[in-house]
Each structure stands twice: as C-alpha cells, then as structure tokens.
Image (cartoon, grey):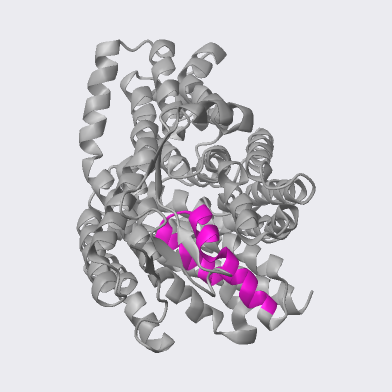
Amino acid sequence: MTWTQNYDPMGGLLLSTAIALIPIVYFFWALAIQKMKGHIAGLTTVILTVLIAIFGYGMPANMAVTSTVFGAFVGLWPIGWIVINAVFLYKLTVKSGQFDVIRSSISSLTNDRRLQVLLIAFSFNGFIEGAAGFGTPVAISAALLVGLGFRPLYAAGLCMIANTAPVAFGGIGIPLVTAAKTTGLQVMEIARIAGVQLGLMAIIVPFWVIVAMTGIRGAMEILPAILVSGLSFGLTMFLTATFLGPELPAIAASVVSLIALALFLKLWRPKHIFRFDDDPEVKAGTEHTYSMGQIVKAWSPFIVLTGFITLWALPAVKNILKLQNVVIPVPGLDKLIMQAAPIVTKPTPYGAVFTFDVLAAAGTGILLAALLSMFLVRLSFSDWISLYGKNLKELMYPLITISCVLGFAYIANYSGMSATLGLAAAKSGKVFPFMAPILGWLGVFLTGSDTSSCALFGNLQKITAEQIGVSSTLTVAANATGGVAGKMISPQSLAVAAGATGLVGQESDIFRYTLKHSIGMVLVISIMTYVMAFFM
C-alpha cells in the first residue's frame, strides 16, 4: 500500500508551516535555552517529530517508525563509522607519543594560536572536507587543536566556523553533482556560480573566524597572514570551479592556502604572539628540536590518512570498492511513499535503500590508515585493540545523538515536513533569491548534509526561480552555498564535534557558540544571491 505526501495537511500553508516548524523550534529551545545534552535533545525531538508526522501529516505509523529507524541506521553507517575511526586515528598519535612531535612541528612554524587556527581549522580542515566530507574534517581538525592545547569548546566551535567555504565542494564535489542530477542543470554552470560565492566567502571566513576567536583587534594584528590564507584559498577555489568543475576546488584551494601560509610564516611574524591565559610560557631555546625523519614519522598517520581518503574518493577506485556494497531496500518504506508536485514535476516514488558499503565507506579507508599507522608509530596490536575499545566506549553517547538526529532528518523528509518548509519559502515571490540560500541552510540543518539538502530542495529552487523569472542555476547553486553555513549548527555536526573534543553532553554549548555565526554567514550569502539575481 502506498501513501502520498501532503505538503499542506492543515488546509492552509501558514498553519502547516507552523506545524512543520515545531520540531525545529523545539530542538533550538532544547539546546540553546534548556541546555539539554545532545542525545536527550535529539531523542525527544525525534519522538515529537514522529508524533507530528502521524497525527499532523497523516503518515501511516509503520512508515513513520520505519523511516526513523532507517535514518538512525544511516547515522551509525556511514556517518558514525567515520567519526569512530577519525577520532581513533588522532588518539593513536597521542597514545604512541607522536603527538608531542606534531605539536612541536606546528609550534616551529608559529606559537601564535590564531595562526594555528588558520593552518589547521581553515586550510587543513578544508582539505579533509574536499576529499572526504561528512563528519571527517571537524573530527580530525578539532581533535588536533585540542591536542595542541586549545580548550575543547574553542576547538570545536572554531573548526565548525572555519569549515564553511569548502562544504559545497566537499567529498569531491558531490553536493553540486547531486544538485545537477536532481534538477537537470549543467553542473559546470552551478559550480561556476558556487565558485564565485564561496570564493568570496573563503576570503571573508579566515578574518571571521579570528574575530570570533580574539576580536577585531586580534584579527588586525595578523591581517597579512589572513589575507595570504584567504586570498590564496578563494582565488584557487574560484579558478578551479570555473574551469575544472566541482570535484577539485576544495582540495586544490586548501593545499595552495596551506603551502602559501606556511611559506609566508617563514618570512613574517606578528609583533604580538597570541597565547591563551592558561598556556605555558614559551621561552626561547627551550623548544625540542626534532629531525625531519622524526617529524615525518609523527605526521605519518595523517599523511597515510590523506592518501587513503584521496584514493577512496577517486571514481575508478570507488567503483571497484562499490562492487562489494550490500544494497538493502527498506521493507515497508522503499518506493511506497509518493512525492507530489510541486516538489517534483510528476508523482514520484520515494526510494528508501540502505547501502552497507563495507569497503567503499570513507570510514573504512580511515580505519585502514589507522591500521597501517600502528606499524609506523610502533604501537603493539594489543594496545591498538585496547585503545579502539576505549574509543568506542567514549563515543557511545555521540553515536546515540547522531542516530537520533538522522532519525529526525529522515522522518522530516519522508513525512513531507521538510517540503512544507521549502514551499513556504518559495512563496516569497521576488524576495525568493534572498531566501534561496536560507532554504539550503535549513536543508543542511535538517539533514546534516549539503548533498541531502540539494537533493531535497534542488528541484523546488529551480521551479520557483523559473516562475519569478530569475536564473534557476543561481538559486540551485545558492541552495548549496547557503547550506555551508548550516553545517555548523546541524545536530549531526554538533554530535561529531562533541565526540571529537571530549564535550559529550555539552552539544548545547557548541550550538550557542556557532549559532550567531551561522545566521550571519547565511545572510551574507543571501545578499550575494539577491545582488547576482537582479543587479548582475
């Protein structure tokens, strides 16, 4: 028996939108006001959403429960699998004693905490985002900053703010590729517009994240480094997106930015070295000196990680690994829910297929990197196993949170709640180009993924743009670029960041730290989109 989604179950879009907003408003209230632990906020939100789906949207109860369980499994695989192994790789370097060498090698470039954020939270983070996506970047980079002595909240928040510009090009460009497939538009044209908008954002973000860290005065003290970091990143992203497409901009921009800033720091130092109040004093001549061989050995887990995630992202390798995928249509859900106009041009079955990609999953590549690193850093297998077990135990609550929020995302999508919110935004008329990035932002908040947001709202963006006479390519691209600002407040990202930095149960603190930056950034992208729609 099939069930057709109804995007206006209350008989009036205003009231239906208010009903659809209840779980989101509740989740914001639970984290920002009540300061609930992440897994409790997530669990109560998903229960509330299921009840609204059944009694508000008329969704059959068995489908509501099944779609929620389906989302929870996706939270564990592949997302939880990535988080487990990414955090484990970092802990491996700590356990083996190699992180002391890593810390020293970064300090040899700079002891300034602001410059360390530019190197790791912005440039290195962007590379991991471009190659792997999902939760890998924040998990790795935030853990690195904690190891360097950053307070966990700072580390998590700063990495999430910094990890904005590359998100639309993350995972080898998959969000934009998905947007093109969903809408039938040219992927090169979507990438070109995203390259313009995010190229500009990449210039702004380094300044933004340092202001968030130390204020405007602190940012101005290292303005030359900020400009080197942002301009090299933004220009490379723009050129790569314009001439090569969506696959390489994040990777290329991050590598160029990292090298440019590292070389610049060989020639320039800020007059004032910024350190935290509780940082140990750094005295000249007291630093450890390590050989190049020792430094390479210490960094080897991350070098191997880079190799594996890059290899795993190559289409030829990915296609071979996918041969081992186990594809499971979800009983009682797959193609039994019908999407309706105007979300789609004609009634379309909503697929529900769980893919158990044992080899192709990015988390498996990270695990293999950790296994090879065991030999490189000379850790015994018994210690490796013991550490992995402790890591699993410590990440139990973040995994529960991730499962809950993915369950929330899936029930919101399958019930039609997400579509109701999208249709409400589409009613804004000539203001729609301003709303287009906000719709993408909302989509990423709901799903935790820019790719999923593009799949969810891409066609709606296209149809609405054509109705009001603006470029549909612009609004579809804006869905992806606006989504990058939603990444830092999505429940999935909060759970990943909390797990990586030891802030389990304090997701509300991270949320309150990043919320204003998320809103500010999406408004900047909205203004860009409006100007491009009517004045360019």
Using the image as rendered, state which of residue 154 and residue 307 is in the foreground. Answer: 307
**Picture quadrant where residue 217 is located:** bottom right
User: Is residue 442 in the magenta section?
Assistant: yes
Looking at the image, how many numbered discs can be counted on the residues? 0
User: Where is residue 2 drawn, in percent x and y?
Assistant: 36, 64
Using the image as rendered, state which of residue 65 and residue 214 is in the foreground. Answer: 65
- The answer to whether residue 308 is visible is yes
Using the image as rendered, state which of residue 323 and residue 137 is in the foreground. Answer: 323
- The answer to whether residue 277 is visible is no
Identify the residue at horizontal 59%, vertical 52% (top origin).
178
Identify the residue at horizontal 66%, vertical 41% (top origin).
257
Q: Is residue 91 left or right of residue 169?
A: left
Identify the residue at horizontal 73%, vertical 49% (top origin).
241
From which residue to which does the magenta span run?
A: 437-466
User: Where is residue 175 drawn, in percent x and y?
Assistant: 57, 52
342 up-or-down from 153: above or below: below
User: Is residue 407 in the magenta section?
Assistant: no
Identify the residue at horizontal 35%, vertical 76% (top origin).
21
Using the image as rendered, state which of residue 511 and residue 71 is in the foreground. Answer: 71
Q: Is residue 10 left or right of residue 171?
A: left
Q: Quadrant of the C terminus?
A: bottom right
Q: Residue furthest front?
A: 1
User: Where is residue 531 drawn, in percent x and y?
Assistant: 71, 76
User: Where is residue 249 drawn, in percent x and y?
Assistant: 68, 45
Question: Is the magenta region chiefly helix, strand or loop?
Answer: helix
Q: Quadrant of the N terminus?
A: bottom left
**Picture quadrant where residue 32 is located:** bottom left
